Amino acid sequence: MASISIMVPTRNREYDIIRLLDSIKNTAHNTSNIEVVVTHDNDDLDSKRVLNAAKDVFDFKIDAYEQVKDTVKPFNLSECFNCMAAKTTGDFLWALNDDAFFCSEGWDSILLSSAEKYLADKPDKVAYIAAGDSTNSKSTLESYCCFPIMTRNSYNVLGHFFHKEMTTWGADCSLWYVFDAIGRNLNLTNEIIIDHKTFHFNIANPEDGTMRVIRDSPSFYMESDFYASSMSVVDCVEKIASKDIRKLRQYIDSFSENKERVYHSRGKFYRAAIWGLGVELQKSKEGGG
């Protein structure tokens, strides 16, 4: 049976991480198919204590890892998730915050059964799955997912979960953009609901949260290296995402004799044409949707 790996970075929020673990225990149908991988700073002794105790309390696998807190370099949340992803064993990788908690009964069964049906005719097993975030508007849910899920095959092909250049803000948007461009988004935003204390509305202290970033505007929303590119948000995301789109497209096409495809993205069509080892990605104004 397929399994789920949940990845959670935390810092100084013992109550929140226990609430998340409790919500998994209280809402999942089969916790034997779930593992939770948590990372915390090496100076966060309270989280270490609580997580060690949690391993003996909950009936699902919990792996907690320490990372050395770097006081010089800006915190890279995407790299943090990538380190956790490398330690996972599940068929589906799910990025969560420590202030999130599950609201939907049987979300694990919904995820696994829906994914099985969606992937039935996709031998490459490449897919992105979006769960619902109760604090976001419908318009936001249609453009990206705060807590994305991807298949193991997707992770293996990309070589990462989040792109390391999207250090904090925008990593979830970029990931959605990649899978939407290749037409591999499974929308479960109505079936699986997650609640959380959204960090962007100043509910949490940045030092105590999962994102240790300077809270000055605009560097809170995008770090300095993101701005240094002198590109707009869309242009920057598109440039970073294009390499990942190419990787996934080539892998998917390796399962088919058809080496040229047209697929939908953000109301426009993108054409991927295979040229040897490269892919030429072109926007087309024709069509609609």
Image (spheres, rainbow, N blue to C red):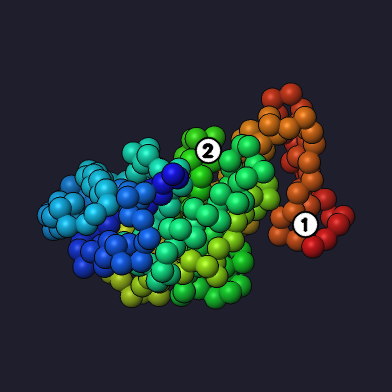
Mark 2 vs mark 1, foreground winner is 2
CB under 8 Å between discs 2 and 1? no
Q: Which mark is residue 268?
A: 1
Residue 14 versus residue 171: which sits nearer the camera?
14
Q: x and y percent of residue 121 in the render? A: 67, 43
Q: Nearer the viewer, residue 100 or 69?
A: 100
Q: Quadrant of residue 21?
A: bottom left
Q: Residues within 10 Å of mark 2 (few under 14, many from 20)?
A: some
Q: Position of residue 86 (x, y in %)?
A: 37, 37
Amino acid tagged 2: Asn
Residue 83 appears left or right of 262: left
- Image quadrant for the C terminus? bottom right
- With respect to residue 140, does 225 lie above or below? above
Image location of residue 246, percent across then percent down: 65, 37
**Residue 236 seen:** no
Tell me if I can see residue 22 in this picture. yes
Q: Residue at x 36, y 66 (%)?
A: 27
Instruction: Check the image and name the residue furthest to the top.
Output: 276
Residue at position x 36%, y 41% in the image: 88
Quarter that holds the N terminus: top left
For residue 153, the mark is 2
Q: CA distance from mark 2 to mark 1?
A: 27 Å
